[in-house]
Image (cartoon, grey):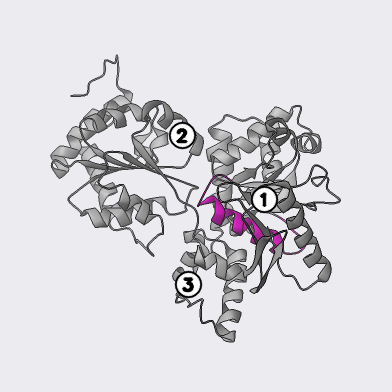
Amino acid sequence: MYYFIMNENIWKSRWSKDQIKTMLIEQFDSFWARDTGIERTQLAEVERAAHMPHAVIVSGLRRVGKSTLLAQMAHKLGKDAFYYINFEDDRFLGFQAEDAEHVYQVLVETFGERKIFVIDEVQNVPGWEHFVRHFMDMDFKFYIIGSNASLLSRELGTRLTGRYVPVELFPFSFKEYLQFSGQGLLNLQRMTTVENARLKNMLSAYLKSGGIPDALKYPELPLQRTLYDDVLYRDIATRYRLDAVTALKELAFYLMSNPASMVSFNKLKDQFRLGSVNTIKNYIDYMENSWLVFTLNLYDFSVKRQQIVPKKIYCIDTGLSNASAFGFSPNTGRLLENLVFLTLRQQTKEIYYYTTPGGYERNGPGSWTGVDFYLPETRQLIQVALNLENPATREREVRALSDGIQGVKVESALILSDANENSFEINGITVEVRSAAEWLLSQ
Protein backbone atom coordinates (compact mmCIF):
# COMPACT_ATOMS: atom_id res chain seq x y z
CA MET A 1 0.00 0.00 0.00
CA TYR A 2 2.27 2.75 1.24
CA TYR A 3 5.94 1.86 1.37
CA PHE A 4 9.05 3.99 1.53
CA ILE A 5 12.66 2.95 0.89
CA MET A 6 14.88 3.73 3.87
CA ASN A 7 18.24 2.54 5.07
CA GLU A 8 17.11 2.60 8.67
CA ASN A 9 13.86 3.40 10.43
CA ILE A 10 14.98 4.91 13.74
CA TRP A 11 11.56 5.43 15.35
CA LYS A 12 10.19 1.97 14.53
CA SER A 13 13.33 0.27 15.80
CA ARG A 14 12.79 1.78 19.26
CA TRP A 15 9.30 0.35 19.80
CA SER A 16 7.89 -3.15 19.58
CA LYS A 17 4.48 -3.72 18.03
CA ASP A 18 3.02 -4.44 21.49
CA GLN A 19 4.41 -1.17 22.85
CA ILE A 20 2.93 0.79 19.95
CA LYS A 21 -0.38 -0.99 20.46
CA THR A 22 -0.39 -0.10 24.16
CA MET A 23 0.42 3.52 23.35
CA LEU A 24 -2.40 3.82 20.82
CA ILE A 25 -4.93 2.23 23.21
CA GLU A 26 -3.90 4.59 26.00
CA GLN A 27 -4.22 7.60 23.72
CA PHE A 28 -7.61 6.55 22.40
CA ASP A 29 -9.05 5.81 25.85
CA SER A 30 -7.78 9.13 27.19
CA PHE A 31 -9.24 11.02 24.22
CA TRP A 32 -12.61 9.29 24.48
CA ALA A 33 -12.82 9.94 28.23
CA ARG A 34 -12.03 13.65 27.80
CA ASP A 35 -14.50 16.08 29.38
CA THR A 36 -16.16 17.59 26.32
CA GLY A 37 -17.37 20.67 28.21
CA ILE A 38 -19.71 23.18 26.60
CA GLU A 39 -20.44 22.78 22.90
CA ARG A 40 -18.21 25.11 20.91
CA THR A 41 -19.64 27.35 18.22
CA GLN A 42 -17.16 25.97 15.67
CA LEU A 43 -18.57 22.44 16.09
CA ALA A 44 -21.20 23.37 13.52
CA GLU A 45 -18.41 24.11 11.00
CA VAL A 46 -16.79 20.74 11.69
CA GLU A 47 -20.11 18.92 11.35
CA ARG A 48 -20.89 20.59 8.03
CA ALA A 49 -17.67 19.13 6.64
CA ALA A 50 -18.32 15.61 7.96
CA HIS A 51 -19.71 14.23 4.71
CA MET A 52 -17.16 15.94 2.49
CA PRO A 53 -14.03 14.10 1.29
CA HIS A 54 -11.86 17.01 2.46
CA ALA A 55 -9.59 16.95 5.49
CA VAL A 56 -10.82 19.17 8.33
CA ILE A 57 -7.93 21.21 9.77
CA VAL A 58 -8.52 22.75 13.22
CA SER A 59 -5.84 25.25 14.19
CA GLY A 60 -5.39 27.72 17.01
CA LEU A 61 -3.42 28.67 20.10
CA ARG A 62 -2.33 26.01 22.55
CA ARG A 63 -4.96 25.14 25.17
CA VAL A 64 -7.92 26.81 23.45
CA GLY A 65 -9.79 23.49 23.26
CA LYS A 66 -8.91 22.08 19.84
CA SER A 67 -8.76 18.49 21.12
CA THR A 68 -11.98 19.03 23.05
CA LEU A 69 -13.69 20.33 19.91
CA LEU A 70 -12.72 17.20 18.00
CA ALA A 71 -13.73 15.05 20.99
CA GLN A 72 -17.17 16.63 20.67
CA MET A 73 -17.18 15.66 17.00
CA ALA A 74 -15.85 12.18 17.78
CA HIS A 75 -18.73 11.51 20.16
CA LYS A 76 -21.12 12.33 17.34
CA LEU A 77 -19.25 9.93 15.03
CA GLY A 78 -19.28 7.10 17.57
CA LYS A 79 -16.55 5.24 19.47
CA ASP A 80 -16.06 2.60 16.77
CA ALA A 81 -15.82 5.04 13.86
CA PHE A 82 -12.32 6.54 14.09
CA TYR A 83 -8.65 6.15 14.95
CA TYR A 84 -6.92 8.66 17.23
CA ILE A 85 -3.23 9.58 17.28
CA ASN A 86 -1.62 12.33 19.38
CA PHE A 87 1.79 13.29 18.01
CA GLU A 88 2.56 15.54 20.98
CA ASP A 89 3.16 12.35 22.97
CA ASP A 90 6.90 12.11 23.72
CA ARG A 91 6.83 8.49 22.59
CA PHE A 92 6.37 9.77 19.02
CA LEU A 93 9.66 11.70 19.06
CA GLY A 94 11.52 10.83 15.89
CA PHE A 95 8.38 9.67 14.09
CA GLN A 96 8.56 10.24 10.33
CA ALA A 97 5.87 10.29 7.65
CA GLU A 98 7.12 6.94 6.34
CA ASP A 99 6.25 5.34 9.72
CA ALA A 100 2.55 5.94 9.10
CA GLU A 101 2.01 2.64 7.29
CA HIS A 102 3.39 0.66 10.21
CA VAL A 103 1.21 2.52 12.71
CA TYR A 104 -1.82 2.02 10.46
CA GLN A 105 -1.23 -1.74 10.47
CA VAL A 106 -1.14 -1.71 14.28
CA LEU A 107 -4.33 0.39 14.36
CA VAL A 108 -6.15 -2.11 12.16
CA GLU A 109 -4.99 -5.03 14.30
CA THR A 110 -6.03 -3.21 17.47
CA PHE A 111 -9.28 -1.46 16.54
CA GLY A 112 -10.36 -3.10 13.29
CA GLU A 113 -10.90 -1.32 9.97
CA ARG A 114 -12.06 2.26 10.19
CA LYS A 115 -12.09 5.08 7.65
CA ILE A 116 -11.60 8.15 9.85
CA PHE A 117 -8.43 9.54 11.46
CA VAL A 118 -8.38 12.11 14.27
CA ILE A 119 -4.80 13.41 14.58
CA ASP A 120 -3.52 15.78 17.27
CA GLU A 121 -0.57 18.20 16.77
CA VAL A 122 0.24 16.90 13.31
CA GLN A 123 2.87 19.59 12.70
CA ASN A 124 5.27 17.66 14.95
CA VAL A 125 5.75 15.11 12.14
CA PRO A 126 8.08 16.19 9.32
CA GLY A 127 6.37 15.65 5.98
CA TRP A 128 3.03 14.86 7.62
CA GLU A 129 1.16 16.03 4.52
CA HIS A 130 2.56 13.09 2.53
CA PHE A 131 0.84 10.37 4.51
CA VAL A 132 -2.35 12.43 4.89
CA ARG A 133 -2.54 12.89 1.13
CA HIS A 134 -1.84 9.20 0.53
CA PHE A 135 -4.60 7.99 2.85
CA MET A 136 -7.01 10.60 1.52
CA ASP A 137 -6.42 9.10 -1.93
CA MET A 138 -7.74 5.87 -0.43
CA ASP A 139 -10.92 7.63 0.75
CA PHE A 140 -9.93 8.11 4.39
CA LYS A 141 -11.38 11.10 6.25
CA PHE A 142 -9.05 13.25 8.38
CA TYR A 143 -9.73 15.55 11.31
CA ILE A 144 -6.43 17.26 12.07
CA ILE A 145 -5.30 19.54 14.90
CA GLY A 146 -2.34 21.91 14.70
CA SER A 147 -0.98 24.87 16.64
CA ASN A 148 1.10 26.57 13.97
CA ALA A 149 -0.85 28.65 11.48
CA SER A 150 1.99 29.30 9.04
CA LEU A 151 3.18 25.70 8.87
CA LEU A 152 -0.32 24.41 8.24
CA SER A 153 -1.25 27.01 5.64
CA ARG A 154 2.03 26.68 3.77
CA GLU A 155 2.01 22.89 3.58
CA LEU A 156 -1.71 22.67 2.96
CA GLY A 157 -1.34 25.09 0.09
CA THR A 158 1.23 22.90 -1.61
CA ARG A 159 0.07 19.41 -0.70
CA LEU A 160 -3.67 19.44 -0.02
CA THR A 161 -4.80 22.17 -2.41
CA GLY A 162 -8.56 22.20 -2.62
CA ARG A 163 -8.87 19.18 -0.35
CA TYR A 164 -9.17 20.68 3.12
CA VAL A 165 -11.58 22.73 5.19
CA PRO A 166 -9.83 25.11 7.63
CA VAL A 167 -11.45 25.74 11.01
CA GLU A 168 -9.89 28.34 13.32
CA LEU A 169 -10.56 27.92 17.02
CA PHE A 170 -10.27 30.91 19.33
CA PRO A 171 -10.64 31.14 23.11
CA PHE A 172 -14.19 31.19 24.48
CA SER A 173 -16.35 33.94 23.02
CA PHE A 174 -18.36 36.07 25.46
CA LYS A 175 -21.41 33.90 24.76
CA GLU A 176 -19.41 30.72 25.43
CA TYR A 177 -17.94 32.32 28.56
CA LEU A 178 -21.44 32.94 29.91
CA GLN A 179 -22.39 29.33 29.18
CA PHE A 180 -19.24 28.06 30.86
CA SER A 181 -19.98 30.27 33.89
CA GLY A 182 -23.47 28.79 34.19
CA GLN A 183 -25.21 31.97 33.15
CA GLY A 184 -28.37 31.52 31.13
CA LEU A 185 -28.60 33.33 27.81
CA LEU A 186 -30.53 36.57 28.09
CA ASN A 187 -33.38 37.79 25.93
CA LEU A 188 -31.76 40.90 24.47
CA GLN A 189 -35.15 42.25 23.41
CA ARG A 190 -36.45 42.31 27.00
CA MET A 191 -33.57 43.19 29.28
CA THR A 192 -34.35 44.31 32.85
CA THR A 193 -32.21 46.82 34.73
CA VAL A 194 -30.82 44.02 36.89
CA GLU A 195 -29.99 41.89 33.85
CA ASN A 196 -28.25 44.83 32.19
CA ALA A 197 -26.11 45.38 35.27
CA ARG A 198 -25.30 41.67 35.54
CA LEU A 199 -24.34 41.56 31.88
CA LYS A 200 -21.95 44.51 32.29
CA ASN A 201 -20.38 42.87 35.34
CA MET A 202 -19.90 39.61 33.44
CA LEU A 203 -18.27 41.47 30.55
CA SER A 204 -15.87 43.17 32.97
CA ALA A 205 -15.00 39.80 34.49
CA TYR A 206 -14.51 38.31 31.02
CA LEU A 207 -12.19 41.12 29.93
CA LYS A 208 -10.07 40.39 33.00
CA SER A 209 -10.05 36.59 32.87
CA GLY A 210 -10.22 35.97 29.11
CA GLY A 211 -11.49 32.79 27.52
CA ILE A 212 -8.77 30.12 27.86
CA PRO A 213 -10.84 27.11 29.04
CA ASP A 214 -8.37 25.55 31.50
CA ALA A 215 -7.48 28.93 33.00
CA LEU A 216 -11.18 29.49 33.74
CA LYS A 217 -11.62 25.97 35.07
CA TYR A 218 -8.61 26.21 37.40
CA PRO A 219 -8.27 29.91 38.29
CA GLU A 220 -6.03 29.11 41.26
CA LEU A 221 -3.25 27.88 38.93
CA PRO A 222 -0.96 30.17 36.85
CA LEU A 223 -1.99 28.44 33.62
CA GLN A 224 -2.05 31.58 31.49
CA ARG A 225 1.52 32.42 32.38
CA THR A 226 2.61 28.83 31.69
CA LEU A 227 0.82 28.91 28.34
CA TYR A 228 2.47 32.20 27.43
CA ASP A 229 5.93 30.83 28.26
CA ASP A 230 5.25 27.64 26.28
CA VAL A 231 4.35 29.67 23.20
CA LEU A 232 7.44 31.86 23.49
CA TYR A 233 9.98 29.16 24.21
CA ARG A 234 8.55 26.00 22.62
CA ASP A 235 6.51 27.31 19.70
CA ILE A 236 8.75 30.24 18.76
CA ALA A 237 12.31 30.17 20.18
CA THR A 238 12.80 26.43 19.75
CA ARG A 239 10.91 26.03 16.49
CA TYR A 240 12.65 28.94 14.80
CA ARG A 241 16.02 28.31 16.50
CA LEU A 242 16.33 31.81 17.91
CA ASP A 243 19.42 32.84 19.84
CA ALA A 244 18.15 36.26 20.95
CA VAL A 245 15.48 34.90 23.30
CA THR A 246 15.76 37.90 25.61
CA ALA A 247 14.86 40.29 22.78
CA LEU A 248 11.92 38.09 21.79
CA LYS A 249 10.71 38.01 25.39
CA GLU A 250 10.99 41.80 25.79
CA LEU A 251 9.19 42.47 22.50
CA ALA A 252 6.38 40.06 23.36
CA PHE A 253 6.06 41.63 26.81
CA TYR A 254 5.71 45.08 25.24
CA LEU A 255 3.10 43.96 22.72
CA MET A 256 1.04 42.04 25.28
CA SER A 257 1.17 45.07 27.59
CA ASN A 258 -0.23 47.34 24.87
CA PRO A 259 -3.20 45.60 23.24
CA ALA A 260 -5.05 47.53 20.53
CA SER A 261 -2.13 49.94 20.17
CA MET A 262 -0.29 51.32 17.15
CA VAL A 263 3.25 50.07 16.62
CA SER A 264 5.97 51.15 14.23
CA PHE A 265 8.50 48.48 13.26
CA ASN A 266 11.19 51.15 12.92
CA LYS A 267 10.57 52.49 16.42
CA LEU A 268 10.47 48.97 17.86
CA LYS A 269 13.82 48.24 16.20
CA ASP A 270 15.36 51.24 17.95
CA GLN A 271 13.59 50.60 21.25
CA PHE A 272 14.83 47.02 21.51
CA ARG A 273 18.18 47.73 19.87
CA LEU A 274 17.74 45.14 17.17
CA GLY A 275 19.83 45.74 14.08
CA SER A 276 17.14 45.30 11.46
CA VAL A 277 13.49 46.08 10.89
CA ASN A 278 13.30 42.61 9.34
CA THR A 279 14.19 41.10 12.71
CA ILE A 280 11.23 42.88 14.32
CA LYS A 281 9.00 41.83 11.45
CA ASN A 282 10.14 38.22 11.72
CA TYR A 283 9.60 38.08 15.48
CA ILE A 284 6.06 39.47 15.14
CA ASP A 285 5.40 37.03 12.28
CA TYR A 286 6.47 34.19 14.57
CA MET A 287 4.05 35.42 17.23
CA GLU A 288 1.26 35.58 14.67
CA ASN A 289 2.08 32.11 13.36
CA SER A 290 1.82 30.81 16.92
CA TRP A 291 -1.55 32.55 17.49
CA LEU A 292 -0.21 34.92 20.15
CA VAL A 293 -0.92 38.23 18.39
CA PHE A 294 -2.55 39.66 15.26
CA THR A 295 -1.53 42.69 13.23
CA LEU A 296 -3.98 45.04 11.54
CA ASN A 297 -3.13 47.14 8.49
CA LEU A 298 -4.33 50.58 7.53
CA TYR A 299 -6.98 50.58 4.81
CA ASP A 300 -5.45 52.41 1.90
CA PHE A 301 -5.47 51.97 -1.87
CA SER A 302 -1.69 52.30 -1.78
CA VAL A 303 -0.15 48.96 -0.77
CA LYS A 304 3.13 50.78 -0.13
CA ARG A 305 1.50 53.10 2.38
CA GLN A 306 -0.15 50.11 4.07
CA GLN A 307 3.30 48.65 4.61
CA ILE A 308 5.11 51.75 5.88
CA VAL A 309 2.55 53.23 8.27
CA PRO A 310 2.19 51.81 11.81
CA LYS A 311 0.16 48.67 12.39
CA LYS A 312 -2.26 47.93 15.20
CA ILE A 313 -1.53 44.94 17.43
CA TYR A 314 -4.12 42.71 19.08
CA CYS A 315 -3.56 39.74 21.37
CA ILE A 316 -5.32 36.36 21.14
CA ASP A 317 -6.90 36.64 24.60
CA THR A 318 -7.47 39.50 27.01
CA GLY A 319 -6.82 37.28 30.04
CA LEU A 320 -3.50 36.18 28.55
CA SER A 321 -2.62 39.85 28.04
CA ASN A 322 -3.45 40.63 31.66
CA ALA A 323 -1.51 37.65 33.00
CA SER A 324 1.64 38.09 30.94
CA ALA A 325 1.91 41.88 30.76
CA PHE A 326 2.34 44.79 33.11
CA GLY A 327 0.20 47.86 33.60
CA PHE A 328 -0.20 50.58 36.19
CA SER A 329 -3.95 50.61 35.62
CA PRO A 330 -6.45 48.38 33.81
CA ASN A 331 -6.48 48.85 30.02
CA THR A 332 -10.23 48.28 29.95
CA GLY A 333 -10.91 50.37 26.86
CA ARG A 334 -8.14 48.73 24.86
CA LEU A 335 -9.15 45.28 26.08
CA LEU A 336 -12.70 45.93 24.91
CA GLU A 337 -11.45 46.97 21.49
CA ASN A 338 -9.25 43.85 21.45
CA LEU A 339 -12.30 41.72 22.20
CA VAL A 340 -14.29 43.35 19.39
CA PHE A 341 -11.40 42.64 17.02
CA LEU A 342 -11.32 38.94 18.01
CA THR A 343 -15.05 38.71 17.38
CA LEU A 344 -14.74 40.32 13.95
CA ARG A 345 -11.67 38.23 13.09
CA GLN A 346 -13.69 35.03 13.56
CA GLN A 347 -16.11 36.29 10.92
CA THR A 348 -13.68 37.66 8.33
CA LYS A 349 -10.00 38.30 7.70
CA GLU A 350 -10.83 41.45 5.73
CA ILE A 351 -10.42 43.92 8.61
CA TYR A 352 -8.52 47.20 8.57
CA TYR A 353 -8.25 50.36 10.61
CA TYR A 354 -8.84 53.67 8.86
CA THR A 355 -7.40 57.11 9.36
CA THR A 356 -6.68 60.24 7.36
CA PRO A 357 -3.07 60.64 6.12
CA GLY A 358 -2.03 62.55 9.25
CA GLY A 359 -4.16 60.61 11.69
CA TYR A 360 -1.61 57.95 12.58
CA GLU A 361 0.74 60.49 14.11
CA ARG A 362 0.57 59.62 17.79
CA ASN A 363 0.42 62.20 20.56
CA GLY A 364 1.30 59.60 23.17
CA PRO A 365 1.32 55.83 23.73
CA GLY A 366 -1.66 54.41 21.85
CA SER A 367 -3.39 57.71 21.03
CA TRP A 368 -4.32 58.44 17.44
CA THR A 369 -7.12 59.86 15.31
CA GLY A 370 -9.07 57.38 13.24
CA VAL A 371 -11.67 54.62 13.07
CA ASP A 372 -10.90 51.39 14.88
CA PHE A 373 -12.23 49.03 12.20
CA TYR A 374 -13.26 49.15 8.57
CA LEU A 375 -14.85 46.08 6.97
CA PRO A 376 -14.64 46.49 3.18
CA GLU A 377 -16.82 43.41 2.52
CA THR A 378 -19.82 45.03 4.23
CA ARG A 379 -18.54 48.62 3.95
CA GLN A 380 -19.01 49.16 7.66
CA LEU A 381 -17.07 51.40 10.04
CA ILE A 382 -16.89 50.36 13.70
CA GLN A 383 -15.73 52.53 16.56
CA VAL A 384 -15.22 51.19 20.12
CA ALA A 385 -15.49 53.43 23.18
CA LEU A 386 -15.67 52.33 26.81
CA ASN A 387 -18.40 54.92 27.35
CA LEU A 388 -19.66 58.15 25.80
CA GLU A 389 -20.37 60.09 28.98
CA ASN A 390 -17.59 62.60 28.39
CA PRO A 391 -18.67 65.11 25.70
CA ALA A 392 -15.08 65.34 24.41
CA THR A 393 -14.97 61.54 23.97
CA ARG A 394 -18.29 61.54 22.14
CA GLU A 395 -17.17 64.39 19.87
CA ARG A 396 -13.88 62.62 19.08
CA GLU A 397 -15.56 59.33 18.15
CA VAL A 398 -18.18 61.01 15.99
CA ARG A 399 -15.55 63.16 14.26
CA ALA A 400 -13.48 60.07 13.46
CA LEU A 401 -16.52 58.38 11.92
CA SER A 402 -17.31 61.52 9.95
CA ASP A 403 -13.78 61.52 8.50
CA GLY A 404 -14.11 57.84 7.68
CA ILE A 405 -17.44 58.27 5.95
CA GLN A 406 -15.91 60.93 3.75
CA GLY A 407 -12.80 58.89 3.01
CA VAL A 408 -14.07 55.39 2.13
CA LYS A 409 -17.18 53.76 0.70
CA VAL A 410 -19.50 53.21 3.67
CA GLU A 411 -22.98 51.71 3.94
CA SER A 412 -23.28 51.72 7.73
CA ALA A 413 -21.43 52.76 10.88
CA LEU A 414 -21.48 51.47 14.43
CA ILE A 415 -20.31 52.73 17.81
CA LEU A 416 -19.91 50.06 20.48
CA SER A 417 -20.02 51.42 24.00
CA ASP A 418 -21.61 50.64 27.38
CA ALA A 419 -25.25 51.29 26.46
CA ASN A 420 -27.70 51.39 23.56
CA GLU A 421 -28.61 54.85 22.26
CA ASN A 422 -30.70 56.25 19.45
CA SER A 423 -29.09 56.09 16.04
CA PHE A 424 -28.20 59.22 14.09
CA GLU A 425 -26.93 60.12 10.64
CA ILE A 426 -23.68 61.49 9.25
CA ASN A 427 -23.81 62.57 5.61
CA GLY A 428 -26.76 60.24 4.99
CA ILE A 429 -25.10 57.22 6.66
CA THR A 430 -26.89 55.74 9.67
CA VAL A 431 -24.73 55.38 12.79
CA GLU A 432 -25.96 52.88 15.36
CA VAL A 433 -24.87 53.12 19.00
CA ARG A 434 -25.05 49.74 20.69
CA SER A 435 -24.13 48.14 23.96
CA ALA A 436 -20.87 46.27 23.36
CA ALA A 437 -21.99 43.45 25.67
CA GLU A 438 -25.25 42.94 23.78
CA TRP A 439 -23.48 43.18 20.40
CA LEU A 440 -21.01 40.50 21.47
CA LEU A 441 -23.87 38.16 22.41
CA SER A 442 -25.61 38.75 19.10
CA GLN A 443 -22.63 37.68 16.97
Q: Which amino acid lies under the numbered mark 2 shown in the image of this protein? A: Ser
Q: Is residue 337 magenta?
A: yes
Write down the quadrant of residue 381 in the picture: bottom right
The mark lying in front, picked from 2 and 1, is 2
Q: Is residue 176 magenta?
A: no
Bounds of the magenta segment: 326-350
Q: Dot 1, crowdedness within 10 Å: few (<14), some or many (≥20)? A: many
Mark 2 lies on a secondary structure that is helix
Looking at the picture, how far across and down is residue 386, in whole percent? 70, 67
Instruction: Read off the residue under disc 2.
Output: 153
In this orientation, does residue 217 appear?
Answer: no
Looking at the picture, how far across and down is residue 9, in whole percent? 29, 22
The one of 167 and 208 positioned closer to us in this rendering = 167
> Nearer the N terminus, badge 3 or badge 2?
2
Q: Residue at x 47, y 30 (%)?
A: 154
Disc 2/disc 1 C-alpha distance (Å): 25 Å
Instruction: Read off the residue under disc 1.
Output: 256
Write down the quadrant of residue 288 in the picture: top right
Disc 1/disc 3 C-alpha distance (Å): 26 Å
Q: Which amino acid lies under the numbered mark 1 shown in the image of this protein? A: Met
Disc 3/disc 2 C-alpha distance (Å): 34 Å
In this orientation, does residue 188 appear?
Answer: yes
Q: Which amino acid lies under the numbered mark 3 shown in the image of this protein? A: Ser
Q: Residue at x 45, y 69 (%)?
A: 180
> Nearer the N terminus, badge 2 or badge 1?
2
Instruction: Read off the residue under disc 3.
Output: 181
Q: How many numbered discs, if any?
A: 3
Q: Residue at x 36, y 33 (%)?
A: 162
